[in-house]
Image (tube, helix red, strand yellow):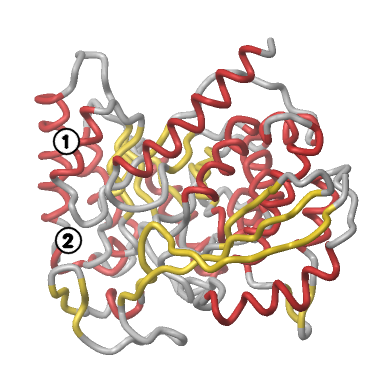
Amino acid sequence: MKIKDIITSPGMTGFYFDDQQAIKDGAESDRFSYVGQAKTEGFSAIRQAGESISVMLILEDGQVAYGDCAAVQYSGAGGRDSLFLAQEFIPVIEDEIAPQLIGRELNSFRELAEEIDQFFREGERLHTAIRYGLTQAVLDAVAKAKKKTMTEIVAEEYDLELIAEPVPIFTQTGDDRYDNVDKMVIKHTDVMPHALINNVKDKLGENGERLLEYVEWLKNRVKKLRPTSDYLPIFHIDVYGTIGLAFDNDPQQMANYLEELAQAAKPHNLRIEGPMDSGSREEQIKDMKVLRDEVQNREIAVELVADEWCNTLEDIKMFVDQEAADVVQIKTPDLGGINNTIEAVLYCKENGVGAYQGGTCNETDRSAQICVNLALATRPDQMLAKPGMGVDEGLMIVKNEMERVLALLKARG
């Protein structure tokens, strides 16, 4: 089966592009918007509409396979690629990339995805969002050509055991970190709440008091609403480097605070994502390792999750090799081709590090569905419910796709 044609269409994502630097520097919120000037290159406002591009591969038999190009909410921050705008990149796909793919055989997802991921344009690799969407479409195309699920294709090509069991799902509240927790408990979310702690003054507290109060509230709220006494979701909170800002990146002070948070969370397991942002990959690895060593030596019951400056497959391998995290977020759009997401999950598992197949609220329904298939094949410790910050929509898309694929796998024995 060959690719006969490639068609693109502009699309919306499930959230927004946000200028992380402006927000960290104290941009004032105005209901759902922000007041002030953007600080990251490419942004016209601190918060602007998220954009995507659907790439549709027309196969010889008329079937249509597709994937969505999308980039993370905080584009241009922490070493990530620049802002992804549809009008800018549709001509690149149609005029420069499509001619290289039309007529290609769909024998192997892995081979074609690895080739696409190494495409160069003007001396640089393609934007991560383009590589992300194109390789999604290729996986769907190979699955359609072979009349199998995308999960089965990944398992076959990477020699993985197919396990027809769900992967734990992690939901995120966005700024509505109270009401959205109720939704999570009612729907029995495995991991929660993310909480979007991206500002010291308003969300963490100058001495961490606001987040500490929130964790205590969170534990009590789950206990009040939970359907059964054995429902004990993992608490996973993303602090966007604010703990480092509040405690001057001092590992002992930070560990003291993490110990308070862990005590407040008991009996729930606690994961803290991005405790500091050290400004570069090398400094981030060094600081994360020092903090992790301090936490482990004191036997503090918290897992540290790498996020900032841990964007590419190479980055992830460095964090894993340096033992700089208990869990690594594999932020799927940041890795470019989805073949890299597969490799990243497998590398973490092979080396005894937790694998969190993440992504961003700023993706689409299609990229989320395809990520479900990757997770079912590779078996990370958790995957993100996406897109959006409303809980219900992202959880529905991910959970329903997971159950559909599982039902098909079980039916096929």
Disc 1 and disc 2: Cα gap in Å? 19 Å
Quadrant that contains the C terminus: top right
* Residue 36's disc number: none
Residue 355 versus residue 100 in the image, above or below: above
Q: Quadrant of residue 165?
A: top right
- The outermost residue toward the front is 62
| Residue at 36% across, 35% down | 299
Q: Residue at x 47, y 35 (%)?
A: 382
> Which mark sits nearer the N-terminus, 1 or 2?
1
Give the x, y percent position of residue 138: 74, 50
Instruction: Name the secondary structure under disc 1.
Output: helix
x, y percentage for residue 59? 79, 49
Task: Tell me the quarter of the image containing the N terminus.
Answer: top right
Total residue callouts: 2
Depth check: 270 or 339 in front? 339
Please name the residue that numbered disc 2 is placed on: 203
Q: Amino acid at mark 1?
A: Asp
Q: Position of residue 276 (x, y in %)?
A: 37, 63
Horizontal arrangement in the rendering, residue 308 relative to residue 377 (left or right): left
Residue at point 38%, 38% (across, down): 170
Residue toward you, 57 or 37: 57
Label 2: state its secondary structure: helix
Counting other residues with Cα less than 10 Å from the Cα at mark 1, is it few (<14), some (14-19), or many (20 or more)? some
Q: Are marks 1 and 2 in contact (CB under 8 Å)?
A: no
Three-letter code, disc 2? Lys
* Residue visible at 38% across and 44% down in the picture: 394
Please state if 202 lies on the left or on the right of 271 as rendered: left
- Position in image of residue 118 (x %, y %): 79, 65
Above or below, 244 relative to 365: below
Question: What residue is shown with label 1?
Answer: 182
